Structures are given as C-alpha cells and as structure tokens.
C-alpha cells in the first residue's frame, strides 16, 4: 500500500512545471517548492511532469536539478553534502521505477559496501515484469546488460547466487506443487545440514522457483525440520554470504520485514545511513511503504515518521515525511 | 532473410479459414489444402487465421488439427508416424514464434537426447526480446518459468552454462569495449589452456556479453593466440560439454553456419532426423533460412531443396519445400 498523498484536485501539469522552473530560478534553489510538488505526485504524474517540462523548457527536469547542484559554488562542504543527500532522494523519486532500479543496480555494481544486498533486493522484491523493465532500462541507460555488470563485478558464491537472481523471470501464479515442495524442502535441509550453502540446488531453488512455490517449500521445511530455514542459515552469524541468503529468503517471502530491518539498521546507525533510507523510501513509497511503516512501528514501538523526524533534518526530512505520507498534500 | 512465399493478392482471411475447415471435414484430412494455405502465410497472417478460425468455429485451429490425428483410427502405424511428422511441422509453424520457442524448450526439458543443444539454440539465436517473449509464453503455457525447468532438468556443467544462457537479456547495441575484449580474450585463453572449460569467467563471458562484444573478444583471441577458439575447444572431440560450448560460440557469432550443420547432420543421418529438420525450418523460415540454405549449398554442393526432396517424402516433403520457398505461393 502506497503512502503517497496526492492533492485533490490535482493542479494542471503546466502549473507544476512552471512552479518547478521558478524553484530553479535565481540564486539558490527553492527546495520547499520542489518538495511540495514532486513529493505529492504519483509515478504517472511525475512522468508527465518530466515530459511536459522537457517539451516546455527544452531541458530534462533532472538535468535542471543537477545544474543547481553544480552551480552552487558558494556553499560549505556541509551544505553541499546536505544538498547531495536531498538531491539523491529527489532524483531517485523522480525517475520512473524501471530507471530507478537500473540506476540503483548500476550504482551497486560499482561499489563494494553492501552492494550485493541492493542487487538481491532489486531482483527479489520486484515483480517479474518490473525486474525485466529495469533490465531494459539498464540497456538504454548504460549500453550493456545488468547481468553482464553483475557477473563482472562479483565473484565466487556471490556471483553464483546474484547472477541467476537478477536474470530471473519468475512465474507469478499461485499454483503450488506440494510433492515438489516436500522434495525440495528435504533437499534444502540436507544441503544446509552439510553446510553446503553454495550448493547448486539450493541456489537453483531460491533463484528460479515462483514465490508461491518457495513459500510452500519453506513452510514444509519448518513443519518437517522444526525451525525456520533462516534460523538454520544463521550457523555462522558473521558470514556475509549466509547473511545474503537469509535476506534473499526474506525478500522473497516477507519483503516488508526485510525493508523494516533495512530502515531500522539505517536509522539506528551512528549518523544515519541516508543511502539506505532514501533507497527504501523512494522505491517502496508507491508499493508497500504503508506495510513497512506498520511493521516498523510493531518492531520498534515508534512510528516511522517520528523516527525519521528524530534522525534527519531540513529539506531531506521534509521530503521523506512527504513520501511516508506524514504531511498533507 | 525469409524463404516464405506469400500469394499476391492475399485471399481474405475468412476464405482461408473456410478452406481449412473444409480440409478437416469428412473422412481423412486434405493435407495438400492445409499446406497450400498455411505454408504460404507469414507470422501475422497465421495469427489472424488462428484468431478468425477460433471466432468463426469456436475451436482452436491447432486443436482441430489435433482432433484429426486422434480420429484417424483406421490407419497403419506407418501412416500414423508419417502424419505425426507432418503434424509436428504444421503445428510448430502455425504457432507464433514465442509459443513455438516455449513449446520446443519445454519439450527439450523433458527429453534427454540432444535437448541441451535445443535449449542453447533458443537462448543464443533469438533476439533478447524474442527470448523474453518465449519466457513469457512459457509462463502462460506451462504455469512455471523456463529457467525453473531448465535448472531442474539439468545438472553439473550443463546447468551451469544453460541456466544463465536461457535467462540472459543481452545488450544488443554495436558498441564494443576493445580493452575489455583484450582482457577477456586473454582470460578465455588462460582458462582453455588449463582445460578449465567450466570456469566461471568463461561461462560468464559467453552468457552475458553482447554478441558484438563477444565477437570482438573472439576476433582478438584469434589474432593473439593463432586460431579460432572453437579449435581450442576441440581438445576432447567426444566431450559433450565441449561440443555444447562450441555450438554456443557458433550460435552467437555465426548462427547460419550452426543451423546449416544441424540440417546437414539430420539429413545425412540414416533415416533422417525429422525432429531437427522440422525445428530448423519452422523456426528459421521467416528469419534467416535463405542464408542457411546458401550456406548449405556452399558446404554440400547440393541445393537445400534438392537435399530435402531426396531425403523426405509425401506431404511432409511438400510442406518443407513450401517453407524453404521451393514451390509457388
């Protein structure tokens, strides 16, 4: 469920563009104006704004935003960092979801820290068609394929898992083969008991079966072998590959819990991990951020918007609050 | 280039449907009539015929054909086999290309003989979007994903190669990174010299790079190391995995040569391998069968249509000849 609030009635798109143009004019940028508009328009509306803006002013809206960034000479490093954090959120949010996923995935293939997690997250929490549109957008934006970059930038077990994950086009029907679920639950248990975490079959099952089928398999796993597969995958708590396997299971079966944890860890960190908060809010606001926020409150006994207010400041805070549906449209 | 001949002017689709209906009426089937129509209609026209036929007679054209098959009680096993061979060709041809690929791939995941070759062929000779449409059709037809079945039905090195091949969505631009081509040519040569044919990087390169990039890499390989990569992949001529690697390279770089060889081996075999001939003719007639036929003539000093006439008989021969463009529309 979306947290986004869109004003009723909606201002004409030409007005939105004119206001945004004004926000970029003169000295500095009128961030509040940008947030009040873009923070309250849905996917289709933002797309129309970008198209109309480009037609009217002969410039891409994101390029205009980018220019603001490079033109601001007279700011301190601190101000600049603050603006960069806001800019990344506004930019990710303004992109359509396929471009945004392509952008995040590309960024992940170029970094090391926690990038595997981001790639897995995109591969496992999007619908089959959404993942595919991201792969198409990747071709257009980067003149190569996503799997090519993932394969090139990862090695060993991580590659073995991530490559089929990002290449998957899972069946999305509800049909479940219970016999198969039992066989594969047993197979998973065998491999995990032997600590064969990078086993071909284990990866094949997680990377190719439908979510409904995996869910049935893991339910059977629990019934038959006494505990959640993720408990059994915790044998070596510091092992990064095992952590990625656990996240994969979570993303496939309970994405809202996975995202709740990403936000929780990002907020609880000394000096908030804005990268992670931005990513989750920008990618989930129109999908399931409502559920993620509910989960957050249950787990932390604090509403998500209050946690955001406590941990962030300024325009970045305002934009986040707009997207989690805290302010009025 | 297509070998198909379509009559000018084209009869109205309603007439085609009426004729086909007549071909199924009464005792037996009028195969000549079916061939004269379906053997001379392109992809879009056949689709329209199927739709119109279903609307007019409340029955799928392929189901009608299927019924003919099951209703023919009074035929000998020989006649039945002859009809089955013709029926498979008519059926594959009548399906749209995505359904046809899904059907062939599904058939391949359920068989053992040479099925790996068919899966690789579909993965490596179709465009990225075509492969994707086949994966979508697979969901619709079989309520599961292609990669799921491929992963489940293959093991070891074959799975390691086939799974990323069928899951790929290659970039199709012409851009080539020459530095990368050199690095990866060297990498390939290193691995092949060590007989590490199932090496992660070797498979990654073949499974994820664009055709243009692979071509550049293999050209550099030849320049730098003195011979074609496929020569170096022939160290163990009887090794089936090596044979599959060689075919993969061929399908990516010179598909018409690959298909020429498939037809050549199928025709030269004692008792013609109709399965392979049917597959190549039905899948390539509207793509590059003209080039394949040219290649065939160069390699065998016999025109393809003459080879077909010599090796096949009856209505199957007639339908093949129609699709290779031998008869008049």
Image (cartoon, coloured by chain):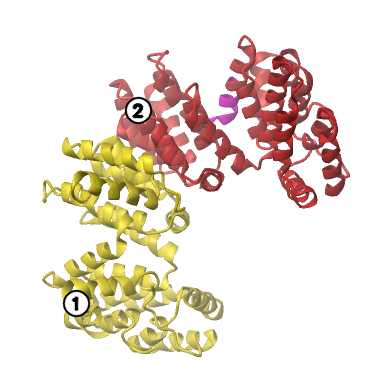
Chain colours: A yellow, B red
| Magenta stretch prevailing secondary structure | helix
Which quarter shows the N terminus of chain A? Answer: bottom left
Q: CA distance from mark 1 to mark 2?
A: 53 Å
* Magenta stretch bounds: B253-261
A192 and A98: which is toward the camera: A192
**Left or right of A195 on screen, residue B165:** right
**Left or right of A249 on screen, residue A130:** right
Quarter occupied by residue B28: top right
Q: Is disc 1 in contact with disc 2, using a CB cutoff of under 8 Å?
A: no
Q: Position of residue B231 (x, y in %)?
A: 43, 18
Q: Position of residue B188 (x, y in %)?
A: 34, 29
Q: Is residue B201 above or below residue B79?
A: below
Mark 2 nearby-residue class (10 Å; few <14, some 14–19, many ≥20): few
Residue mark closest to the camera, 1 vs 2: 2
Can you tell which mark lies on residue B208? none
Describe the element under mark 1 as helix, strand or loop. helix
Q: Is residue A275 magenta?
A: no
Residues behind callouts 1 and 2 on a single chain:
no
Q: Residue at x 69, y 16 (%)?
A: B77
Describe the element under mark 2 as helix, strand or loop. helix
Q: Chain of mark 2?
A: B
Mark 1 nearby-residue class (10 Å; few <14, some 14–19, many ≥20): few
Instruction: Give the residue pinned by disc 2.
Output: B157
Q: Is residue B258 magenta?
A: yes
Q: How many marks?
A: 2
Q: Is residue A82 above or below residue B10?
A: below
A111 and A273: which is toward the camera: A273
Q: Is residue B25 above or below residue B259?
A: below
Instruction: Give the residue pinned by disc 1.
Output: A77
Q: Position of residue B249 (x, y in %)?
A: 47, 29
Q: Chain of mark 1?
A: A
Q: Residue at x 27, y 80 (%)?
A: A316
């Amino acid at each position: 469920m979306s947290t986004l609030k869109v004003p009723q009635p909606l201002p004409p798109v030409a007005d939105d563009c004119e206001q945004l143009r004004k926000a970029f004019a003169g000295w500095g940028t009128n961030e509040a104006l940008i947030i009040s508009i873009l923070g309250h328009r849905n996917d289709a509306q933002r797309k129309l704004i970008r198209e109309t803006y480009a037609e009217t002013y002969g410039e891409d809206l994101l390029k205009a935003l980018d220019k603001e960034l490079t033109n601001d000479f007279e700011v301190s490093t601190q101000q600049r960092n603050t603006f960069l954090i806001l800019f990344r959120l506004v930019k990710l949010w303004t992109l359509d979801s396929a471009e945004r996923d392509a952008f995040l995935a590309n960024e992940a293939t170029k970094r090391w820290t926690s990038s595997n997690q981001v790639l897995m997250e995109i591969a496992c929490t999007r619908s089959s068609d959404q993942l595919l549109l991201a792969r198409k957008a990747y071709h257009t934006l980067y003149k190569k394929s996503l799997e090519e970059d993932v394969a090139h930038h990862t090695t060993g077990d991580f590659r073995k898992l991530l490559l089929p994950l990002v290449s998957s086009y899972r069946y999305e029907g509800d049909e479940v083969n219970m016999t198969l679920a039992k066989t594969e639950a047993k197979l998973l248990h065998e491999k995990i008991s032997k600590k064969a975490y990078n086993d071909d079959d284990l990866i094949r099952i997680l990377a190719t079966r439908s979510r409904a089928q995996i869910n049935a398999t893991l339910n059977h796993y629990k019934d038959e072998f006494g505990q959640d597969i993720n408990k059994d995958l915790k044998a070596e708590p510091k092992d990064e590959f095992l952590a990625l396997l656990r996240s994969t299971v979570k993303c496939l079966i309970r994405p809202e819990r996975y995202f709740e944890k990403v936000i929780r860890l990002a907020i609880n960190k000394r000096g908030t991990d804005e990268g992670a908060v931005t990513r989750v809010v920008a990618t989930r606001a129109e999908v399931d951020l409502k559920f993620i926020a509910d989960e957050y409150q249950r787990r932390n006994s604090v509403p998500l918007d209050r946690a955001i207010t406590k941990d962030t400041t300024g325009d970045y805070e305002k934009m986040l609050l707009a997207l989690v549906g805290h302010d009025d449209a």
